[in-house]
Amino acid sequence: MSLALISIPAVAQADITPPPDKIVIEVATVNGSGCPAGTAAIAVSPDNTAFTVTYSQYMAQVGPGISPTEARKNCQLNLKVHVPQGFTYAIAQSDYRGFANLARGATAIEQANYYFQGMSPTVVAKHNFSGPLDDNWQTTDKVDIASLVYAPCGEKRNVNINTELRVSKGTSAATETSFIAMDSTDGSIKTTYHFHWKTCP
């Protein structure tokens, strides 16, 4: 699925080579029912081309005895990305992974967007799933180069990443339980965000 984003005037020259210095990402805040404190971990790839987020309690579910509030889970990550001087970045691609068990007639949604502090949010990218489904899932949101939104050069602005999982009983039987998850107790399921780099003037 292609994700159209709000573009800003070019402030740098295109450069697909990542900066050689180590990128450090600090979690400023974590909010949401899908990522209680201590349940989201972030790591930067050794080549500075991406970072991953691993969740351990991110699941939306419906079924007998399950509270209605469990049908929708969300998470907002507010991140401080420390970039080497002379570089700026955009998020060019996002890969989301998880597992879903949906009864026949049940449906689920995974959606996400992001924005830099003080700038407009990107368009929400939404992916739909329908039961019967009992398998791993993966979605990818990719941005055209011309539509990339970059952090302003020379400014420290946090990036906010918003994700949401939602599941609906639909026409499934009243006795059925359905869920969609983006969590991993062993760290094997990760959400990956890919950087696109530019050099600043």
Image (cartoon, grey):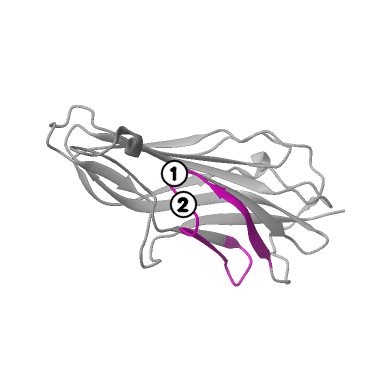
Q: Residue at x 74, y 37 (%)?
A: 8
Query: Which label number is shown at residue 116?
Result: none
Distance from disc 2 to disc 1, alpha carbons, whole Å, reads 6 Å
Please provide percent x and percent y for residue 17: 70, 64
- Residue found farthest to the top: 171
Q: As drawn, is 201 to the left or to the right of 168?
A: right
Q: Is residue 15 above or below residue 129?
A: below
- Which residue is identified by label 1? 33
**Nearest to the observer: residue 14 or residue 63:** 63
Whether label 2 touches label 1, CB < 8 Å: yes
Mark 2, other Cα within 10 Å: few <14 / some 14–19 / many ≥20: some
Residue type (three-letter) at the residue carrying disc 2: Pro
Secondary element at tag 2:
loop
Please provide percent x and percent y for residue 52: 52, 60
Please provide percent x and percent y for residue 115: 64, 41
- Which residue is identified by label 2? 36
Secondary element at tag 1:
loop
Mark 1, other Cα within 10 Å: few <14 / some 14–19 / many ≥20: some
| Magenta range | 23-50
Q: Is residue 39 above or below residue 145?
A: below
Please provide percent x and percent y for residue 110: 40, 40
Q: Residue at x 82, y 62 (%)?
A: 85
Q: Where, by quadrant of the figure, is residue 46 drawn? A: bottom right
Q: Residue at x 33, y 36 (%)?
A: 71
Q: Is residue 89 above or below residue 42?
A: above
Q: As drawn, is 138 to the left or to the right of 114?
A: left
Residue type (three-letter) at the residue carrying disc 1: Ser
**Nearest to the observer: residue 14 or residue 182:** 182
